[in-house]
Amino acid sequence: MISCIIPVHNGERYLGDAIESVLQQTYPRLELIVVDDGSTDRSAAVAGSFGNRLRVEVQERGGASVARNRGVELSSGDLIAFLDADDIFELHKLEFQERRLRERPDLDLSAAYVENFKSADFSGAGGHEFHRRRAWPRAITTWVLRRSLWDRVGPFDENMPLSQDVDWHMRAVSAGASIETLPIVLSRRRIHGDNSTRFANDQCRAAVLKSLRKNVTGPRRRQRGGKR
């Protein structure tokens, strides 16, 4: 079984599309958990409207990492996937990646390409971010990973407000994970007026730099017998 976790904070506008993209997957053995992270809009109600086809967990505002970690704690699948509340899966995404993980018992994490698309209600300027097809294996919405890898690497860093997926990916690499990127688009990232990372480039770069120092410099120092 694949457990899919969707964290949401005030995402009622697009959450229904995200949920539908999971429930319509061609892979049948799914568990969907939506974690409402202190929303003040109708996000919980939107998720609840799908009835017993998913589980809705409501928590106080803690951030995306806290919500994702909570979702994994509640899940029971052998494989784990993540989807942001404003993005969508391609129809065959989980089927393709489950098959790949089954074909390769040595593989810990399957990633793929992500495709950007403009939301119909977005009228902002274009730019490089609208390049349709991107090879970005650190994009969390492309991942399907084994629970055994999650147990090795540990949860998302709840002290990082941004780029938690990049940090987790670096930790997985440091842990010796076998990771493969399929050269096909399996997830779609919605560009709209409220994307958290579009307006926080400096903060994202700072978070990635912090993660690099932690995951590259730290292990080298330990190997040399130095102190962290």
Image (spheres, rainbow, N blue to C red):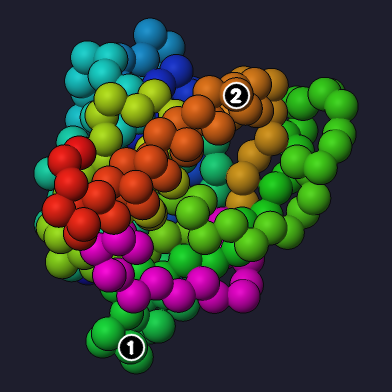
Q: Is residue 105 left or right of residue 127?
A: left
Task: Name the foreground residue: 135 vs 141.
Answer: 135
Q: Which residue is mark 1?
A: 104
At x 27% / y 46%, what residue is drawn? 218
Q: Which residue is mark 2?
A: 202
- Percent coordinates x, y for residue 47 in the rendering: 36, 32
Q: Is residue 198 above or below residue 140?
A: above
Segment colored magenta: 172-187
Q: Element type at marker 1?
A: loop
Task: Identify the image quadrant of residue 125.
Answer: top right
Image quadrant for the C terminus?
top left
Q: Is residue 122 left or right of residue 3?
A: right
> If you read the primary sequence from the N terminus, does the residue marked by circle 2 or circle 1 appear first?
1
Does the magenta portion include 178? yes
Q: Element type at marker 2?
A: helix
Does the magenta portion include 173? yes
At x 16% / y 41%, what residue is drawn? 227
Image quadrant for the N terminus?
bottom left
Task: Name the foreground residue: 178 vs 57.
Answer: 178
- Percent coordinates x, y for residue 164 in the rendering: 38, 38
- One can see residue 183 in this view: yes
- Percent coordinates x, y for residue 6 in the rendering: 36, 40
Which amino acid is tagged 2?
A: Asp
Distance, label 2 to label 1, CA atoms, is: 38 Å
Asked if disc 2 and disc 1 are in contact, CB closer than 8 Å, the reply is no
- One can see residue 153 in this view: no
